[in-house]
Image (spheres, coloured by chain):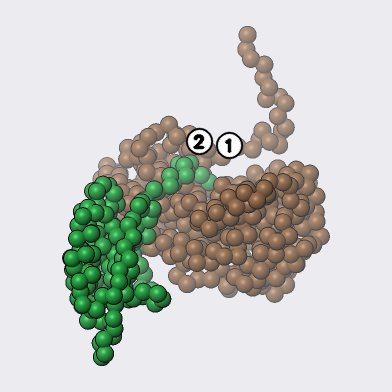
Amino acid sequence: MNPPDVSRYIAQHVSTIPKSGIRDFFEVVQSMTDVISLGIGEPDYVTPWKIREAAIFALEKGKTGYTSNLGLPRLRHSITSYLARRFGVQYAADKEVLVTVGVSEALDLALRAVVNPGDEIIYHEPSYVSYNPSIILAGGKPVLVETRAEHGFSLMAADLEAKITPRTKALVLSFPTNPTGGVLSPDELRAIAEVCIQNDLLVLSDEIYCELTYDGVQHLSLAGLPGMRDRTILLSGCSKSFAMTGFRLGYACAPGPIIEAMMKIHQYAIMCASIVSQEAAIEAFDNCAREVESMRNDYEQRRNFVVSRLNEIGLPCRSPSGTFYVFPDIRSTGLNSMDFCLGLLREYRVAVVPGSAFGDSGEGFARCCFATSLTKVRKAMDRIEIYVKKLKETK
Amino acid sequence: MDPLLDLLQQNSNLSISDLSRLLGLPIAEIEQKIAEYEKNGVILAYQAVVDPEKLDADAVTAFIEVRITPERGGGFDRLAQRIARFEEVKTCWLMSGGYDLAIMLEGRNLREIAHFVSEKLSTVEGVISTATRFRLKTYKQNGVLLSQPLNGERLPVTP
C-alpha cells in the first residue's frame, strides 16, 4: 500500500514556494569530506570572549526568564546609543526599537506588519535568499529589480522607478549586499531615497552588514537621509558585526506605530528573544568597537588576498567594499554557475556557492566567502586555479 | 600601527607575496618597509612561539623581582644591561613600584635556576635582593592561547 499523501494538508502558498537552491547544494557538500568551504555565510570567528563571558555571567546571575516583549530596556538603550554614535540615526529606546530573533525575524515581522494581500513589494537580486519567499508568505507580490555587474551590483534609481506601479507598497533594500558585496554610494542612496519619497514607498532596509565596509567607506544608513526616517524600517542585528550568528539577535527600528504593529506579531509568535543573547548583546553594542575594528581589518586583508588571486586566476571580480563575499564572474569557463560549483566541489573539494542560488541574475557568478582562515583561503585559491586552468584548456 | 607590523606580529612566517596580496601593496614596497623596520630596530627578531611544556616537561620558567641600587649618572641602566646579558635571562624590564627589575628566566631544571640566582644574580654588586617565583602552568604564551577552544562547528554552506 502506498503511504498516504500528506502533502494535501500543506497550504498552497507554501507548497508553491520552491526549495532554496542553496539547500540542494548544501546536501551535496554535506555528503563529502575534506572540503574547504568558502560557502559559509557567517564569520569564522568565535564570538569575542567579552561577549561570551557576558552571556555566562548572565546565566550565573540566574537571568533565565522572559524579557519585555520589546526586549530588555537596557539593550534597547544600548542599540539606540550605538546607532546614534556609529551611524547618526536617532531612535527612541522606549517605543521605536524591537529586539528580535535575528534579523530574519525582524524582516518577517516587518513584512507581515505592512503588507496587505496583493501589495507589490520590490526587492533587488542577486540578494539574500529569503526576501522573495518572505514577501510571498506575508501575502505580498514580490517584484524583482536586477542589479548588474557593470554597476558594481548597485541598485540604480531608474531601474527601481521602472518597476513602481500604483500597487507598490514598499522596497526591501539590502546594502551592503550578500552575495555581491555591493554597496551604494551616497549619491546612489540619495537617488533611491528620492524615488521612494516621490512614490510614497516604505523601505525595509536590511543593514546587517553595516559594520563590514572597507577601504575607509563608512556605511550610510538610509534612515539618516532627509525625509527617510519616517518611511524606513531599519533592520539589523549582531550576527555579522559581532560574529554572533548563533545568538540569533536582531532588531528593528522604526516609527512607533510600525514597531507597535510588528510587536503584536512578535508578541504572539515569539514572545521575546532569548534573555541570554540579549544580555550578551548589551556588551557587544556597548564595549566591542575594538573587536569589530580588528575583525574588519582582518576581513579586509583577506578580501585583498582573494580578489588579487581570483583576478590572476582569470575569474574577474571587483573588490567588494562591503560584506565578506566576493562574487567572481565565472562565464569565461563556459560553464553555468551550478555546474562550475559542482565540478569544483567534486573534483577539487572546494565549496563556493552558485550565483544562481541568489536569483537568476546571479547566473554566471559564484559567491566566495573570505571569512575563513588565510591558510584555507590560500589552499582553496590554489585548487580553483588548477580547476579553472583545466576548464579553459578543455573548452 | 602599520598593518604590516600587525600581520608580522601575528605570523612572521607569511611570505612577501602573501603580505603583498593581503595589504594590496607591491612586493617591492613590502620588502623596503621590512628592511627599514629591521634597520631601525623596530623589528628585533623573528621567533617561533613554542609551548614550553610540550618542548621539555622539566623546563622551568622563573619570574624574579630584583631590587638594585641605582648609580649616579646612569641610573639603573648599567646594572640592568649587565643582568640582561646572561643567556638564561629571556626578558628584563625596569619596573615601577616596589622593586626595580622584572626578569623572566628559563632553565632546563630547578637546579639551573637556583644556580643562576645564587651564583650569578645575587652576587652582582648593586643587587640588593631577589624574589623568585616559578611558573606552574602556561595558559597563554605571547598572545597565543594554549588550549585553543574548538572553533565551534560551522555548517559548510549557509545562505
B144 is higher (above) or lower (below) than B157 = below
The brown one among the chains is A
Q: Say which amino acid is labelled 1.
A: Lys
Whether residue A128 sits left or right of residue B60 in the image: it is right
Question: Could you tell me if residue A373 is visible in this image?
Answer: no
- Residue at the disc numbered 2: A24
Q: Position of residue B150 (x, y in %)?
A: 43, 44
For this rendering, which residue is in front, A322 or B1? B1
Q: How far apart are marks 2 and 1 (CA)?
A: 8 Å
Q: Which residue is drawn at 45% across and 64% down?
A: A294
Q: Position of residue A190 (x, y in %)?
A: 63, 72
Q: Residue furthest bottom?
A: B73
Label 1: chain letter: A
- Residue at the disc numbered 1: A19
A254 is higher (above) or lower (below) than A52 = below
Q: Position of residue A311 (x, y in %)?
A: 34, 58
Q: Which residue is drawn at 39% across and 33% down?
A: A32
At mark 2, the secondary structure is helix
The mark that comes first in sequence, 2 or 1, is 1
Q: Quadrant of the N terminus of chain A?
A: top right
Q: Which residue is drawn at 58% across and 73% down?
A: A187
Task: Name the quadrant containing residue B38.
Answer: bottom left
Question: Answer yes or no: do the residues labelled 2 and 1 have beta carbons within 8 Å?
Answer: yes
At mark 1, the secondary structure is loop
Q: Where is residue A54 in the image (x, y as percent from the top left)?
A: 58, 55
The numbered mark at residue B24 is none
Label 2: chain letter: A
Q: In which quarter of the image is the C terminus of chain A?
A: top left
Whether residue A255 sits left or right of residue A89 in the image: it is right
Q: Say which amino acid is labelled 2.
A: Asp
For this rendering, which residue is in front, B21 or B63? B63
